[in-house]
Image: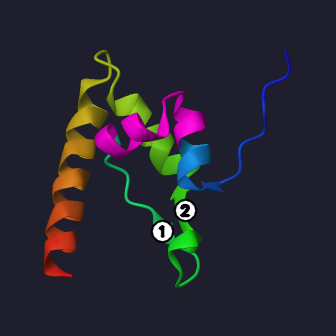
Amino acid sequence: MDTPTWPAAMNQQLAAAYCGISVDTFVKVCPVIPINITTSRAGRRYLRARLDEWLLSLDPVRSKPREGMREARRSALREAQRA
């Protein structure tokens, strides 16, 4: 079975598929903040590297990255509140 080559930046639907979850679930659980490639809403993209970091943070065996992602989420929430 060939594995797909995933782009470095993905729209929400593709990012959800990359994570193996539905878009609805992705919206509810994913803490990754998309970047804006263009000024329109359609230009929002999730970086594959950040998705990978988040997914790895869910692994109970890797407790240290989980703490880092938790702090990243707090920082992102603080930034969003300032905007």
Element at label 2 = strand
Q: Give the answer, above or below, for where 78 lies relative to 37.
A: above
Residue where numbered disc 2 is placed = 45
Picture quadrant where residue 5 is located: top right
| Outermost residue, right side | 2
Query: Mark 1 Cα within 10 Å, few/some/many (few <14, many 20+)?
Result: some
Residue 67 percent location from the top left of the image:
20, 38
Please identify the dominant SS of the magenta region.
helix
Q: Which sits in the foreground, 34 or 27?
A: 27
Asked whether disc 2 touches disc 1, contact meaning CB atoms under 8 Å apart, the reply is yes
Q: Which sits in the foreground, 8 or 23?
A: 23
Q: Give the answer, above or below, for where 17 lies relative to 60.
A: below
Residue 2 percent location from the top left of the image:
85, 22
Picture quadrant where residue 8 is located: bottom right
Looking at the image, which residue is at 21% across and 82% down?
Answer: 83
**Could you tell which of marks 2 and 1 lies nearer the N-terminus?**
1
The question of residue 67 being in magenta is answered with: no
Query: Mark 2 Cα within 10 Å, few/some/many (few <14, many 20+)?
Result: many
Residue 52 percent location from the top left of the image:
49, 39
